[in-house]
Image (cartoon, rainbow, N blue to C red):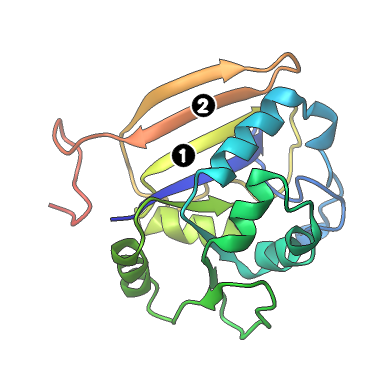
Amino acid sequence: MGHLAAVEFMSLDGVMQSVLSPDEDRDGGFGHGGWVPPYVDATVESFMSTATAGAAALLLGRRTYGIFAATWPYADASDPAVAAMNAMPKYVVSRSRPELTWENSFQLGDDLPAELARVRRETDGEILVLGSGELLRTLIELDAVDEYRLLTFPLLLGTGKRLFDQGAPPRRLVLVDSGATENGVLVTTYRRAAPGNGDRDRDGG
């Protein structure tokens, strides 16, 4: 059964919009794009490489898929993370019908809960969500995320799309790992708490 893990960059005030370059996502007139690269060091690179190389599948929104599909197929295939990303199944969630040019890419159907259940059954290992803010907020509302791996960067952006927005259901989490880079990036891993102690299980019981 697949385990769904979200790996996300966010500012201290929770913004996750346009992390790598100014033109990733200018929705709402967002003008602070590209805030992650100045803080990236060997620790962040190693964390991301391990996460991607160890995954069994990717689950992506349309915008993030388009950015990745324009980059990863042409990257150095001798890098284990690059090789893994290109080889693993890529599941795309979109209301439109984007052209899926990246090998092993599949668009999920409109019934997202049913499609997620199917992908979980068919995946032996970790299903990784990278970026994909709109999709991730939907997954949070569906209470579908088993694990959050958050890289929190030491800056306040004030505006922008946030990781946890209105509509997220209450959910107890357990901190299972934490650390900090020399540049002040907090790296934390949270997993869903076991049912009990007032928490609800995935079926709402």
Q: Residue 173 placed where, x, y %?
A: 34, 32
Residue type of the residue flagged with mark 2? Thr
Left-right relation of 32 to 60: right
Q: Residue at x 79, y 66 (%)?
A: 70
Q: Residue 76 placed where, x, y %?
A: 79, 51
Cα separation, mark 2 vs mark 1, equals 8 Å
Report the label total. Answer: 2
- Residue 176 location, quadrant: top left
Q: Nearer the viewer, residue 89 or 96?
A: 89
Left-right relation of 174 to 36: left
The quarter of the picture where the N terminus appears is bottom left
Residue type of the residue flagged with mark 1? Tyr
Q: Residue 34 placed where, x, y %?
A: 84, 43
Q: Residue at x 64, y 45 (%)?
A: 80
Q: Nearer the viewer, residue 36 or 162?
A: 36
Earlier residue among tags 2 and 1: 1
Question: Can the viewer see residue 43 in this picture?
Answer: yes
Q: Which residue is mark 1?
A: 148
Q: Which residue is mark 2?
A: 188
Query: Do the residues bearing badges 2 and 1 touch, measured as CB atoms within 8 Å?
Result: yes
Q: Is residue 175 above or below residue 149?
A: above
